Structure formats: structure tokens, C-alpha cells
Amino acid sequence: MKTTYKILASFCALYSGVALSNAANSDNGLPPLSLDVEQVTVSGLSSGGYMATQFHIAHSDWVKGAGIIAAGPYYCAQNDITTALNQCVNKVDAPINLDALSSVAIDYANEGSIAPLAGLKDAKVWLFHGTNDVRVTAQASDLLYRQYQSWTDTQNIVYVNDQSAAHHFPTLNEGSNCSVSESPFIGNCNYDTAGNMLNHLLPYLTAPDDSVSGKVYTISQQKLAGSDGETLAEKGFVFVPENCASGESCSLHISFHGCNQYAEVVGNSYVTKTGINRWADDNNIVVLYPQTKKSLFMPLNPQGCWDWWGYTSDDYANRKGAQISAVANMIKGINTGTINKTTTNTGAVNND
């Protein structure tokens, strides 16, 4: 039985570039993967949190859940680095007009640049802001919560804002002191962010055991993403549980790192120490860890942040944006099994 979902009628060529994608994967030993791309989930910290929100809203027809740690509302920066710094991180110099930000999403949806906002109604959303976080204000995270409340059934939203964590990814027992925000921005907080988040986003998860049998594979982001990947690092990473490597149909989760948290700076810390892989390993969840890179020239990105203020283009927060398109291309590229392939730049999904 074959079901086809078409989001943009003008994009109807499926599977373009698959041969190149297969080559990019086989060069690094990535096994053929059969991914359920109708129920993708995303997460991210800080700039990665902003990107996770953007990716969710751009593709809410097939991205069904988002976990956001320490980030503000969609389109907070309004395509302006000055606004980003003055309103969306550690200070709010002027009131943020949430209605104006949300109206941008409405305009994008009307023109087809993001999925219809109605697709957010049944989404699962998990938000976190640590009480010791002085890098992103609680006010910014509160506004993201309010924004999702306007789009999503409130029973599907969890907002954790009572944990004494600094600006990092809190874990059970990995990283720095929970009260300190320092590289690699992973905090030892006796709090299972990964588990709490994934259990909300994905139903009926099995509690993980103490061992991780899956593997982290390296992929060529440049080959998979094409010209859309110019602001990304050459290499990205994919965690693959054993069952998924053996050909079983698996879920897909995408985790976006924060600023100064890309692999060139922190090595494999974000890819291996957040606790996400521990839960993914026993629940048939493939995890894609796309990577940015720093740039000291135009487009200027000295901390290797994800684009949530417009350094790539005015379309950074919608489907036309290079980084959102690049990650969509990566999904298509790693999904080399026989089912559920997704197209480039659209939300169309083919199920065989």
C-alpha cells in the first residue's frame, strides 16, 4: 500500500541524488537505514534550541515533536543580530512583541514557506530552562512556552523550569558541575534531560540498560547537503542502534548542539554524553547530530552557532533556509533503506 503526502505541488521529483548519498554513507560505513520520517522528533540547546524550533515549525507536517533547552520564541531575532543580542539571550532591553513574531509564522505558512500551523496542534513539545541559566533569560523561554501554547494543545506541552541548572545540557552524571556553564556545556545535574524529554516526545519507551551497543558513524554533510551545507562542517554524526543497523524500521531524532559546542571544539562530547544515545539504543531511535562550523568571515559566525538570526539569508527560519534545507537533505541521504524516504526542501513523504 502506498501513501503519498505532497506539501508543495511544484516539488515532485523524489529521491534525487540518492546515488551520491549512498556513496557518501558507504564511504564511512553507515549501514542502510529504514527510517520512519512521518514521526521525526528534534531537540537542541541554546542556538540549537532555536534551530530545533525553526526546523519543527518549518516541517511540522512530519516533525511531530520538539525538545527545546534554553531558547526563546520562533523568529525572536527578526533577522537582526542586534535584536538577537538585545532581546533573545541574556537580556531583554525592550518588550518582545510575541504577536508580531507569530504573525511571521502565519505569513510563512500562507505562502507555503513552512508547513501549515494546524500541524502543530497535536505536536509534543518539551521545554527546559534552568534556574541558574544566565545566558538565556527565563523571559525568553517563557515566551517560547506561550507561543507554543497558541499553536499546540496545552496537554501536549511540558515546561520544566524548576531545576537548578546553568546554561548547558543537564544530565544524570556527565559533564561539569550543574551550577557552572562551561565547555562542553554538559552539566552533571542528577537530572535525566534526555530521558524526560524523549519519554514525552515518543510514547512507550523502554528504560535503557547500562550498556550502549549501537555505534556513532561519521557522514559527509557536504556531500549529503550539497550547496545548502556551505555553513556546516564537513562531517556530521549519526548514532545507530544495532537493530536499526540490521535493517529494522526505526524512528529518527535530530539533536542540534549549541554555540561553541560543535565537534571541532568539544570533540564527541555532545554526540556521546547527553544521554540521548542511551535511550535511543534500546528504543530503535537513530539520532542525527548535524554540525556547524565557525566562520570569521562573511557569513560571520565566530562561535559556530546555528543560524537563528539570519547570517545565512533572510529565509533562515523557513524551508528555504540553507541550514534547514541542508538537514532535510541529510535525512534523505541517510535514509537509504526501502521505506519512508523524504524529499529535499519539502515535507512530502513517500511510504512504500
Image (tube, grey):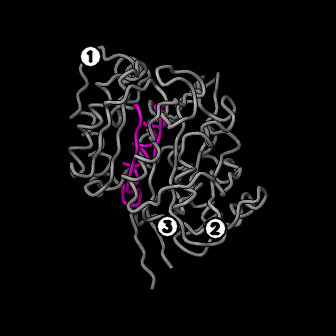
Give the CA separation, mark 3 to mark 1.
Answer: 43 Å
| Viewport quadrant of the N terminus | bottom left
- Displayed quadrant of residue 9: bottom left
Q: Position of residue 316 (x, y in %)?
A: 46, 39
SS class of the residue under badge 1?
A: loop
The answer to whether the residues at label 2 and label 3 have Cβ atoms under 8 Å apart is no
SS class of the residue under badge 2?
A: loop
Marked residue nearer the N-terminal end (3 or 1): 3
Q: Position of residue 272 (x, y in %)?
A: 62, 43
Q: Hey, what amino acid is under mark 2?
A: Thr
**Vertical side of 207 occupied by 222: above or below:** above
Q: Hey, what amino acid is under mark 1?
A: Ala
Residue 299 makes an appearance in the image: no
Indicate yes or no whether the magenta region holds residue 179: no
* Mark 3: few/some/many CA within 10 Å (<14, 14-19, 20+): many
Q: Position of residue 182 (x, y in %)?
A: 56, 21
The residue stretch that appears in magenta:
43-70
- Displayed quadrant of residue 94: top left
- Displayed quadrant of residue 21: bottom right
Q: Position of residue 297 (x, y in %)?
A: 64, 23
Q: Which mark, residue 336?
A: 2
Foreground disc of the pair 2, 3: 3
Give the CA separation, mark 1 to mark 2.
Answer: 48 Å
Marked residue nearer the N-terminal end (1 or 2): 1
Q: Residue, x 55% and y 50% (percent of image)?
A: 327
Q: Residue, x 56% and y 50% (percent of image)?
A: 278
Q: Hey, what amino acid is under mark 3?
A: Asp
Which residue is identified by label 1?
94
Q: Is residue 296 left or right of residue 327?
A: right
Count of all numbered marks drawn on residues in the image:
3
